[in-house]
Structure formats: C-alpha cells, structure tokens
Amino acid sequence: MNRNVLIVKLAAVGDVVMAMPMVMALRDKDPHVRITWLCGRKAAPLVRRIEGVNEVIEVDEAALLAGSTLAQVFSVLGAWRRIGIRRFDAIYIAHSDFRYRRLAWLIRAKTRRWLGGGVRPRGIVPGRLHSHEYVRLVTGHDDYRAQRFEFPSLRIELSADLRQRLHTFNPTDRPLAAITPGGARNVARENPLRRWPLDRYGELSDALERRGYGVVLTGDTTDGWVRSAFHHRPVLDLIGATDLPSLAAILRHCVIVIGHDSGPMHIARLVGTPTVGLLGPTPPSMFFRHDQQVLYLWPGGALPCAPCYDGQEFADCSNNLCMQMIECSAVLERIDQVLATAGSGQR
C-alpha cells in the first residue's frame, strides 16, 4: 500500500479542482494513506480545506511559470526546502509539462508517475474529462477497469461578515443566483476568448432579478473591470471580497451558478451547486459532463473552427463568435432545466 503519497498539481484553480478526485481514488486504495499536496499559492487555501489531505506545501507558481530563469530556480529550490528529506511511497505529478517534474527531481519515492509517462506515454487524451485522466495516474487503469471518483468534501462555512452581507442584501431569503463574468486567466496568460460578453451578463442579471432571484456577483481582485455593467443593477457585489474557501461557501449557499469556463465554475461543481456552463473555445467534454447538477451551452461547437483549444493554447482569434452565439434566453432555459432536474430551484 502507498502509505505516504505526494500529489504535484498547481497552476489554474479550475485545473486543481479537477484533480481533486485523485484524493478519493487514493483513499479508495488505502483509507489510511497520508496525502501531501504540492500546489500553487492561489489554490493552497482551498486545497487545505479538502477532507483527506493531510498537508499542503505551497510553491510560487507565478515565478515557476512566468518568472525569469533565476526566479524559476528559486521557486523549485523553495519547494525542495519545504519538502525536506522525506521519502514518499508514490509521487503523482498531474502535469505533462516537464517544468512540473523539476519540483520532484530530488524527492525520493518508490513510484513516480506523471501525465505523459508510463508504458504508453501521453498526456491527457483529447476529448477526455480531465478529472478522469488525473484519476488514471492513481489507479493505473486506462481501459474497462477505469473507475469514476467524485470530488472530496470541503471544510467550509460562511464567515460572520459574509452572513451579514447576505442578510442585508437578501432579508426576504430569495433564492440566490451567482454569476462569474470575469476570470478566465492564470499566472501565465489571460484568455478573454473564453468569456461571455459582459453586456449579456447584465441582461441575464436583469432577467434573474425579474424571476425573483437575488443576484450575487463574484470574482477576484483583478475582476473589478466587470463592475461597469452592474453599477446600476441591484446585485450583491462580492468582487475581491472572498478568498477561494469563502467563495466556495458562497457558491454552496446559492441555488444556481452561471458562468463561462473559469475557476468558479469548477468550484461550483465541487460544492454541488447546480451549474450552467457557457462554453466556446474549450470543448465541454474535457471540463464538464452533463449530469443532474451541470448543464452547458456550446452552440459554437457547430463552427468549423471549434474547438480551438488544444489543451495548452488557443487559436489566434480576434472575435469569439462561439461565445457571442450564446443568447440569454437559452441560458434561462438551461437554468430551468438543471434546477428542475436537480430539484433545487424555486422561483
């Protein structure tokens, strides 16, 4: 049995969330396994809340992925220093990029696996759900024996301040709908092609308000630019007001989350809140699956250029027609469908 395991998974928040079923796969093999997770600073507060993760070690992912050569070296050395001279039974590197393998070069381990390694070397198979590919690292099964594992539980709750803000905004206890107009960026790049037009989010906010929802506007400190579409609308503005654990708590408190392919959409899936995903450049089969809690819209899939994301880069596109094709009326229909199926909605 692998009693002492290291997971190496950092970079974008959504990617880290999609790797979390690895925890369930490891504990299925050995309920007593000790799991250490090496992750980036941004995702670390959320990873620390995972039931079943014993220790979190942070690495400066901004330096590793976008810094100078010297900054990259210091980032790797910092990770080695924090891990120390420990020995692991297994190391699972949920990346195919060789830069992430540097983080584990000097760490002793009986077993070492990474995406792209093994008997049949390859990274994530195109079209497959990323969560399943990360689980493949743990189980070693890439055929009919492959298993599906769900997300682990999180230790999260609303802070007193957020509870008060919610009560002040929503004293009549209306159902809450969260929208996430920003995001679509990581430490290495920004991906505006993934975003639904901002004016459509404003239109959706008005429609949700008319239906009796309280609309919660979420995002981090870099998303302040979206406020221009909402300053005259009666929304609860939580842009920059939450870290990832408190964002997860807010999304759990909502009855529906709507947004394009970005970290909050994956966090909503993690906490089990019904979700409507708006997709264009990225193929839904890699990031979402239709089930009782998640529906997506991908009308741009009919375009001859779709999808235009190869797992690392987007096409050189100056007009994301694939996202502009998504109409507000279609989003409202999807909201009705997912809430009716999940049995969670009330209007």
Image: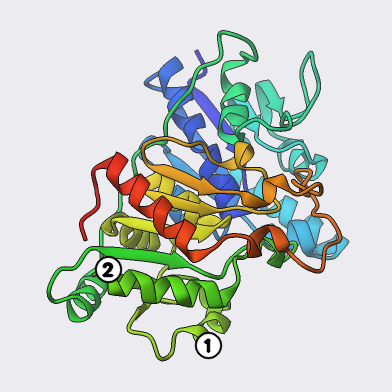
Residue 200 — which label? none
Q: Looking at the rendering, in which quadrant would you find the C terminus?
A: bottom left
Outermost residue, left side:
172
Q: Are marks 2 and 1 in contact (CB under 8 Å)?
A: no
Outermost residue, bottom side:
232
Q: Is residue 79 left or right of residue 132?
A: right
Q: Residue at x 62, y 54 (%)?
A: 12
Decide: is 178 above or below 99. Answer: below
Q: Nearer the viewer, residue 43 or 14?
A: 14
**Residue 273 percent across, percent down from the top left:** 34, 49
Question: Badge 2 local density, few (<14 within 10 Å), some, or many (20+)?
Answer: few
Residue under pointer 1: 228
- Location of residue 163 (image quadrant): bottom left
Question: What is the CA distance from the residue labelled 2 to the residue labelled 1?
Answer: 23 Å
- Location of residue 110 (image quadrant): top right
**Residue 215 percent across, percent down from the top left:** 33, 72
Outermost residue, top side:
144
Q: Nearer the viewer, residue 135 or 102?
A: 135
Decide: is 93 above or below 213. Answer: above
Q: Residue at x 62, y 65 (%)?
A: 195
Q: Amino acid at mark 1?
A: Ser
Secondary element type, mark 2: loop
Residue under pointer 2: 211
